[in-house]
Amino acid sequence: MRLESTLATGAGIEPTTPLAALPVGSESELVIAPMLVVLVAAVGSLLLGRWPRLRIGVSLAGGAAYAVVVAAIDWYVVLAPDAPGVATYQVGDWPAPFGITLVVDGLSAFMLTMVAILGIASLVFSTRVLPEIDRRSYYFPLFHFLALGVTGAFLTGDLFNLFVWFEVMLMASYIFVAYYGGPQHTRAAFWYVALNLLASAVFLLGVGGIYATTGTLNMADLSQRLADPGAYGLEPAPVVGLFALLLSVFAIKAGLVPFQFWIPTAYRAAPPQISALLAGATKKVGIYAIIRLSFTVLADADVPVELAAPGVGTVIAGDSPLAFIGAVLFVMAAASILVGGIGAVGRDSIEGVFAYSSIGQVGFIALPVAIAATTASAELRHLAIVATLVYALNHTLAKGLLFLAVGAIRSATGTSRLSDLGGLAGRSPPLAIGFFVGSLALVGIPPLSGFFGKFLVFDAAARAESAPLLVLLLVGSLLTIAYATRTWNRSFWGAQTDAVEAASVDAVQVGVVLALATAIVAVGVGFEPVYEFADAAASAALDSEAYIEAVDPVEPGELEGGEH
Amino acid sequence: MTAVVLAAVVGALFALGTFLLLRRDLIRVVWGLAIISQAANVYLLSMGGIAAGTADSVPILAGHGDHVPETADPLVQALVLTAIVIGFGMTAFALVLSYRVYEEHDTLDVSELGDRE
């Protein structure tokens, strides 16, 4: 009898319920498309192991299809005149807080675009490097699984799935760090694995605690409940501490000080084209998660926090956990800028320079997030997020280019130690041009993409009216100039060393580097549409109402009246 | 009472895991990681509530109204199941990797690994 009644009411949340009136349209299917494309590419290239040429063909086709799908999302969901701004896909048609929700808004679309551009560059580059290593290995399937994890992390609408996609992404990256299998690679991979397993356990603690506190893991639902804890009968105070746990996990992924120690060894051990992806894409997952949780989930949270943020004129918040997150991020970002910059100046290998540089640059990316979290002005908050996104885009392009250039140098000369290099400019002028553009973008010279990134970050700091921040940014920029010129001078100028004289530079590799250089110039010259995209992305990140409305989480109890 | 015992167990597991994580032997480090991830799983399971739940206390059952018998929260169990699978895969990979480290370096001692910079 009891069983029967359970079954009868169980129908309340069956997929066919009229309550699951979901926004079914072309946008809805588009949301899951990038994941499907990359999954097909991964499995396809996995099955075609016996035919290396076919496998590479499928991989490249998968990369191209991914870019097309992401471009379609950019247009139909974000940029088109009548675009909805947010699109959701409820997996299996289960209504929001119960099923798995995939959401794409301006912020996710912006991040996906960066991954698509860099992914294609890295993929084409890989096809030219791999024959020397092993075409039959699991390189290409792993490449796509890495992209799958990153894509899933950008699209998922709930915290536990964020954990799962992080693991998918990490599992592929573990193998890439250990890929060459030499002594320093295995050692780097072991510590990378150990650190990330520990981080995963911490992530689970955060997720479990948040579920126990709020009764939900869906980000839209979470945001809704935290904004009005009284109505749901929640005691949300622990949420701040639990989000601090999550923040530390994301900071590990982003490589912010004090969690930066794994980066130099891991980036040196991984193949350069994968380091490009690690710096350009997986790092951004950490940044994305911080922005998403801070501004979509926590911004409206009604949880009193009493903290004064040091360094910023306007001390704010009070009843939002953002005050706490902002203060912590300030310290992390400032330390990252200094540690990364100073570390990069003294390295002897080019990978080492750029690995440390990544730590410094991620500081530049995180600093505006901290400004946005602590400011009371909606306008400055918006500007700061735009600054973060533009800077992140520049970092993805420039650092991707530079790591690929390192790959080209290494496969041409067999070394990447600055002391063994010199005079590369005479050996391959096109590579020198590409490298030069990448360095200038990192430094922030107009009219390259880096200029606007740096300009917006300085602008945000200036409007926050904080002199210490400006000094910090200036010091960081000077350090960038110092290591960029030093690397450039020592590898491309001067007398040609033996290694450089014997070098034969691969035309396709240089072509990929030049294509990225062209992209950097194009973003800088035609900055208007890029700015509009970043602007839309920032609005999406800050507009938690639209996000909640699109996901449309069903409130508990609401389902009951559904069919009966 | 159950809550206290459970808290003590989770705490003890974390302590043991951390202790092993700080050993010099790589295999112990892997053990430490495995124990910590299991501790996280036990914690996650306990987050669904220790007392028997009903439609009021278990959010995912809310849609079923009053007809739900006393039951545990099924959601955390699904989460833990996923986490266990991922944890197993990771531990297996870490063990294989330690074997590979042993092959490359002829040692599993952390301090000796660090010396060969």
Image (spheres, coloured by chain):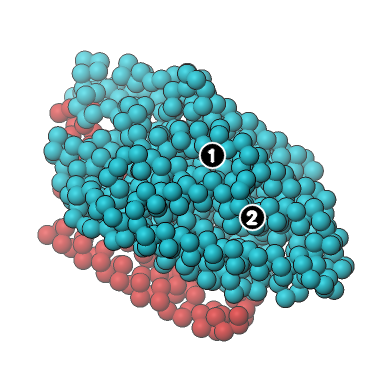
Chain colours: A cyan, B red
Picture layout, residue A205 above or below residue A33: below
Q: Residue A440, which numbered label?
A: 2
Observer-nearest of A206 and A339:
A339
Task: Quadrant for residue A417, please give it.
Answer: bottom right
Which comes sooner in the sequence, label 1 or label 2? 1
Amino acid of disc 2: Leu
Around disc 1, counting alpha carbons within 10 Å, would you say few (fewer than 14), some (14 to 19), or many (20 or more)? many
Observer-nearest of A182 and A486:
A486
Q: Residue A112, which numbered label?
A: 1
Give the x, y percent position of residue A213: 21, 47
Picture layout, residue B6 above or below residue A165: below
Q: Chain ID for label 2? A: A
User: Which image quadrant: the C terminus of chain B?
Assistant: bottom right
Task: Quadrant for residue A350, please give it.
Answer: bottom right
Look at the image and tell me whether residue A300 can be seen.
yes
Q: CA distance from mark 1 to mark 2?
A: 25 Å
Question: Tag 1, which secondary structure?
Answer: helix
Q: Chain ID for label 1? A: A
Give the x, y percent position of residue A307: 22, 57
Amino acid of disc 1: Leu
